[in-house]
Image (cartoon, coloured by chain):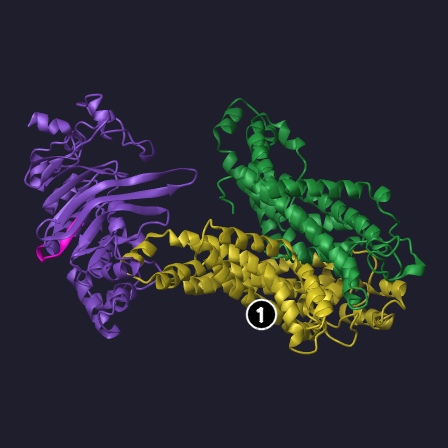
Chain colours: A yellow, B green, C purple
Amino acid sequence: MGLAGYLGKRAVRLVLSLIAVSMLTFTLLQLAPGNFADLQRVNSGATNFGGVGTESMVGELESRYGADVPVWKQYLIFMKGAVVWDFGPSYKYASRNVQDIIAEAFPVSATLALLAVLLALLIAVPIGVFAALRQNTKTDHATMFAVTLGHALPSYLTAAFMILLFSATLKLLPSGGWNGPEDLILPVLALSLGPAAVLARYVRSSMLETLREEYVTAALAKGGPRRTVIIRHALRNSLIPLVTVAGPLLAALMTGTVFVEALLRIPGLGLYFANAAASRDMPLLMGTAMFFALILMVTNLVVDLIYGLLDPRIRTVGGGSHDGH
Amino acid sequence: MTATEGVEAVVGSLSTGEPEPMERGTTARGPWSPAWSRFRKHRLAFGSLIFCALLILTAIAAPLIAPYGYEETDIQHKLAGPGSPGHLLGTDLLGRDILSRLIYGLQTALTVAFGAELTALVLALAIGLLAGYLGGRVESLLMAFTDVMYAFPSYLFAVVMVTVLGRSIFALVVAIGIASWVTQARLVRAQVMTLKEREYVEAARSMGAKGSTIAIRYILPNAIGPILVTTSFAIPAAIAAEAGLALLGLGVQPPTPSWGAMISEGSRYLLAAPHMLVAPAVLFALTLLAFTWIGDGVRDAFDPSGEQR
Amino acid sequence: MSEGALLSVRELRTTFRRDGAEPLTAVDGVSFDVRRGQALAIVGESGSGKSVTMRSVMGILPRTARITGGQALFAGRDLLAIGDKELRKVRGREIAMVFQSAMEAMNPTLTLERQLTEHLLWHGICTKAEARKRAVRALGDVGIPDPEKRIRTYPFQLSGGMRQRAMIAMAMVTEPALLIADEPTTAVDVTVQRQILDLLAELKNRGTGVIMITHDLGVARYFCDDAVVMYAGRVVERAPMGRLLDDPRHPYSVGLLGSGVEVGGRDLPLRPIPGSPPDLSHRPEGCPFHPRCAQAELPRCATEQEILTIGPGRDAACWKVAVDA
């Protein structure tokens, strides 16, 4: 199977999954009791946007979907817009189109996610290798215990402890907001620890496995300096499968920065998504949900392709099919 | 995946603490007592089990233990610091006792987590057993469905579900439960696939046992070990999911307390009243760690060679 | 050390650490010599300690292993005493190793070029450009067609036989004085076996000392001059190859020949030795072979084992040899 064929197959699967996700979300949201207008009436005064969107929403609904259109037709109309990247205006942020909100807020989340995964790798690789080389010693056990801690605590809880330490106690860093580069530090740190724990554990076990490979012994038998052999033969081969873990982590983070964004008041896409859900802003909710699903699937596809590039066994077999090892 | 991303991590979840169903099968007794004795030797896990048992008792007896009601306000002592008279952990902005709110928040967290994992367990078992046992078209259909669910970030799904169902304990149970059954269903199916080729299942079938009998009496009890392992890790994930949703303003309707909401509130008054953040964050962290260590213990008990690590 | 010996191993002992148990002795007082341009076969069943013996000499044992005694004299130096830094200069340069399976002993993610040249550079033998030329030449020498092109490929892209040759080229590119071949023909099919053996025989004829580790006397007799038979970590018989085949003395050697390990094309076991090799953690007292030995006389065989010289370059670890002779 050639690369083109493989890509084609994946693309078809991706589109089908997206359609399934959109139908599921759309159907569910149709079942939701109350709509944006009701909620605004209930909450009026409670939010800054009290009542603002109500009129425009009704108007918008009718101009976009026509009055009294059956649900399935509304779905088709929505999807027709979606394929040309037009989700229509948001209710809550009435003056803005959903796609513009995505275009503005996604880079914020993506920056956090990318930096967090990079930092996680920087933390995890040395720790994992270190622990593997000292397998079953006290250092190893202590390191892995620390990793469990990082693994068990959700990013927003880590962020909470960090603002307690760095903002409230040491008064070194701002406790939230999005004004300058210093606002990146806490969220990126908090987001990176969980993935770092997952990756460190993976690097350790992958490293242990590779160190037992005969080709590592063979490289030592050729007179290779221990450090060189560990880096060139063991580490390199241990890190290739790491892509399969780091990739999905990145994908999960791209869509999973929301909790930290909420806690630290960072205007990322996750925050918009959560606000859209809380205020029944259907176009924004649908738009962001589909965008997140798309990002998740595209990232996974890219990861598979990169994996193919890194491992010559797969690269030459072609198309990233995962056999041959 | 980090246990981190709230619901995201719930992707592998089910309820623990349901020993009855496993006791049913005759073949199931074998692995249990060695597993239990291994678990008891795991000091951290055993200690965590005791801690969590205390938490559960506290949650059940919340009205008896909490010094105040969760809504009760002490207008004279707003934002009182920890250790002030009558308020061990201080009060919040409205003068509500933080210790009491923590205890009721524990109730919320555990109810949602156990409820959600029970939901997920039932769903996963039903679908996994069906798919694994019936095979054929039913299986491809069910597995195609789980594939789609798999592509859907589970926290997104939970958010949508809460939007649909409203902000109640029931809604959270269903939302988190449904968002987290997929991985478990896949695991059940994989287990069933291997188990159903085993000799004793073949034997039972040759003697004319019905499909449903085989599934419940023979396959289920033997698939339960690995399921229990995933399940015990899913409990802390569900607790984190509940708090995460609350953090987003999608948790239980105030004034019912939730740790997530308390953390969110605490972060807003960080400089004026750091104790509002410290108390829930610390208790939350301890709870998550204790449940995670129980999970570690369960895994080591069922998998002493460490293969699943 | 005997006259003209290239490598002279004396009383080598290697133990393995175990959790909650006494260390396990895998190699127990092994001695032998290899001369320049000669081939020595170390014959024994799996678990007899033959591989561990050679890995001890090379200093490439797993971390749980320890050398607790003995000497390995090579070019006037004791390899077991010079320390890893000095030993590394010998390893892969003057003593090279060929493994059972090139599939496992060659790094699947590095090209042949990288793997055939890296130790030339580690040992500072030549420049990178010169290393490449030598590697191409080495590949040509082992009969790989079109070496210029093949050197850019990965091990898995070669056929099994080619891969095995490439591994031999990798060992020989530094022109070592001694080549250790650890079951080099076990993992390949019969036609390739013959080619590999011819290749090793040719190397011997060009003056390289060869140590062939094998469980297969049929392979050992193909070009080896001397043989050492090992059982349960000990040498039970040492003899010139022809003498061993014609007139084995130790009952185990007799059994090994009798079990018909393919001498002259017959590969059906004639009279297999009853029982199975001992678990090293429960090594029988005295002669470890006595529970399986048809001629064992208790209590003497269960209390002591002595080595008797029975001719030039010949000895056997069985007191009955002297009685018989």
What residue did someone put label 1 on? A115
Foreground pick, C83 / C157: C83
Write down the quadrant of residue B299 in the picture.
top right
Residue extent of the magenta highlight: C205-211
Chain containing mark 1: A
Whether residue A247 is situated above or below residue B118 in the rendered picture: below
Is C105 covered by the magenta stretch? no
Q: Is mark 1 on a helix, strand or loop?
A: helix
Whether residue A7 is situated above or below residue C78 in the rendered picture: below
Q: Is residue A76 visible?
A: no
Foreground pick, C183 / A33: C183
Foreground pick, C289 / A71: C289
Query: Is residue B52 toward the left or the right of residue C14 in the image?
Result: right
Question: Which three-letter amino acid code belongs to the residue tagged 1?
Answer: Leu
How far across and how far down the image is residue A1, in percent? 41, 59
Whether residue A305 is situated above or below residue B218 in the rendered picture: below
**How many labels sit on residues?**
1
Query: Is residue C107 toward the left or the right of residue B132 in the image?
Result: left
Q: Residue at x 73, y 55 (%)?
A: B243
Foreground pick, C266 / C50: C50
Is C208 covered by the magenta stretch? yes
